Image (cartoon, rainbow, N blue to C red):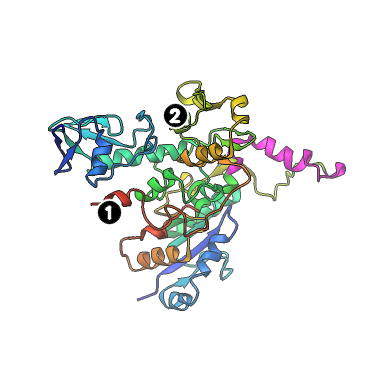
Amino acid sequence: MNKPVIATASLAGCFGCHMSFLDIDERILDLIELVEFDKSPIDDIKKFSRPVDIGLIEGGCCNSENVEVLRYFRKNCKILVSVGECAVMGGLPAMRNTIPLRECLEEAYLNSPTVAPEDRLIPADEDIPILLDRVYPCHEIVKIDYFLPGCPPSADLIWEALTALIQGKPLRLEYDLVKYD
Amino acid sequence: MPEPIKFIIDGKECTAEPGQTIYEAAKANGVYIPVLCHFEGLKPVGSCRICSVRVNGRWMAACTQPVAPGMVVENHTTEVEEYRRALIEMLFVEGNHFCPACEKSGNCELQALAYRYQIMVPGFPYLFPKKDIEAFPKFLLEHNRCVQCRRCIRAIQTPDGKKIFDMKNRSGRVRINVDRKLAAKLSEEEAQKAMDICPVGAILKKEVGFRIPIGKRKYDKKPIGSEIEESK
């Protein structure tokens, strides 16, 4: 039987959840016995080469590229997991959600004291992904099957959840594993 | 001595002293009924409804309702727990609760309730309401996190009985209002008391923060209410 395939992505996140994933330490040796990696920043594969069993998503959606990648994952992954506060609820990037987008851009590119007068320009190149009106949690864009909160979720939580999903067991998480911070 | 009142919670026979509320009597019998707006020693107001129970088929707030003889209380049933869970989820989407950036995290009762109910994500869309932060000489008032429990209103008063906190507006626009003149005279101890009485991170004492390390905070290891359940 082929090994289950997993893929990961970091959208509007800080890569902290990926770092926490790597914090499983020597269990990473067990992991490579258990699964194969497809598209992921860990192996730098850019495109899906086969159907994926489990997709791990870090970060919410703050721009058009995030939405595109998330939909690409949903299309190619049987199970999609929101990993971390940003994927679950928008996280720190979503702190801009109460401020109109124009105000955010003006503050960053026009009015900020560190912007030189000749540099005052809001970027609008067609090659740059378009910012969304606000930051969206992943489950408000596509269907998400499981949620792992935390900033970041601990390595133990990611390990427990991932091994349960690989083996098709129900998620039974200990009290002190699930934390929002 | 008056006769103890007999009543039932989830099939368990319990006794209460006359005048005790369902919440108090349940606690004395080792049964945990979750509360958020209620605080030991303050007059209960029943505003958050987290303590809702079904009594003889009717919804009641356990923190305000006195026990009557023969009451049959449903507490830990699927229907009641699902209802409470929905209330907790609504509180999360109605405010801006960025737990990773909040210094009350780990000691927050709203968060602890969400942990107890194993909420991985709220079932409602996030509203991201626009709210502000107010600064006073001794403390900050973070409206993004306020759940309008009114604990601060009930607990914090000047020595001559004047209220420092009060409510403003109605319904969805309701918010805590502070008397600036009285707040300026608040002592260090009273500011600390205001922070401690707040179930969430809405009232924060200035110049201290993140004093307790992760792992040693109130709800890091044990769920809220476990001390009541372990007492019997």
**Residue B178 percent coordinates (x, y):** 56, 27
Q: Chain of mark 1?
A: B
* Above or below, B2 relative to B123: above
Q: Which residues are magenta?
A: A95-119
Q: Is residue A120 magenta?
A: no
The residue tagged 2 is B154
Secondary structure at badge 2 equals helix
The residue tagged 1 is B230
Amino acid type shown at disc 1: Glu
Answer left or right for B196 relative to B23: right
**Residue A93 percent coordinates (x, y):** 60, 47
Name, please, the residue furthest toward the front. B1
Secondary structure at badge 1 equals loop
Q: Is residue B213 or residue A25 the one in the foreground? A: B213
Amino acid type shown at disc 2: Arg
Q: Residue at x 37, y 38 (%)?
A: B40
Whether residue B214 is visible? yes
Q: Chain of mark 2?
A: B
Q: Is residue A68 or residue B144 the one in the foreground? A: B144
